[in-house]
Amino acid sequence: MSIKVERTKKDYIMDDSCPAYVDLSAMHLCFVDATGRATGSMNVTLPTGQGAKVYGVLLNDPAITETAALKVYGIAECRANETFNAGVELTVAGTNGRVEAAAQGDYVCAIAREASGGSGHCISVTLVNYYKP
């Protein structure tokens, strides 16, 4: 007698969703940060500032309490804050959620897959999450 065991493909979560803690209607394709609430559920809000750790890229434009669609793993599009080359480590530029070249002491949120043409330009990035010593 033999027992047949089937292997299943493990799917990795690349997208997430949760309520917006503040109005994020002007943050489409920008990075947002996670925040907790007394109710115990996670929400998303504006990044805390330049070089800060962030949660993911906002894929829609939710008002306060509406559901925010997020890309948290893999390849995403996001908005640049400045001009930079492909292959550059990126960090959040400030509370606007756009990205710029990371400096020492910043959290790196993405690697540029293509060069940026300047502020507001949409580029392809690979999402990462580490501290740049």
Image (spheres, grey):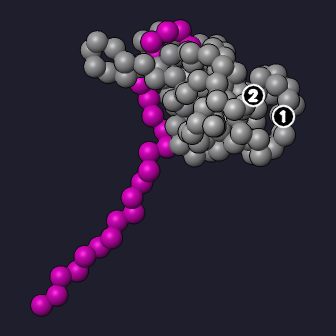
Mark 1: few, some, or many residues within 10 Å (few <14, many ≥20)? some
What is the residue that sits farthest to the left in this orientation? 1
Say above or below: 49 vs 128.
above
Q: Of the residues under marks 2 and 1, which one precedes in the sequence?
A: 1
Q: Amino acid at mark 2?
A: Glu
Closer to the camera, 25 or 21? 21
- Picture coordinates of residue 69, whole percent (x, y): 50, 28
Mark seen at residue 100: 2
Q: Is residue 44 visible to us here?
A: yes
Asked whether disc 2 touches disc 1, contact meaning CB atoms under 8 Å apart, the reply is yes
- Picture coordinates of residue 129, whole percent (x, y): 56, 39
Closer to the camera, 56 or 64? 56
Residue 21: within the magenta? yes
Q: Is residue 59 visible to us here?
A: no
Q: Quadrant of the C terminus?
A: top right
Q: Amino acid at mark 1?
A: Phe
Picture residue at 39% right of the left edge, 58% below the top? 10
Q: Disc 1 designates what residue?
A: 84
Magenta segment boundaries in residue numbering: 1-24
What is the residue that sits farthest to the front in this orientation? 133
Mark seen at residue 92: none
- Picture coordinates of residue 131, whole percent (x, y): 58, 36
Predominant SS of the magenta segment: loop
> Which element type, helix, strand or loop, lies under badge 1?
loop
Q: Quadrant of residue 65?
A: top left
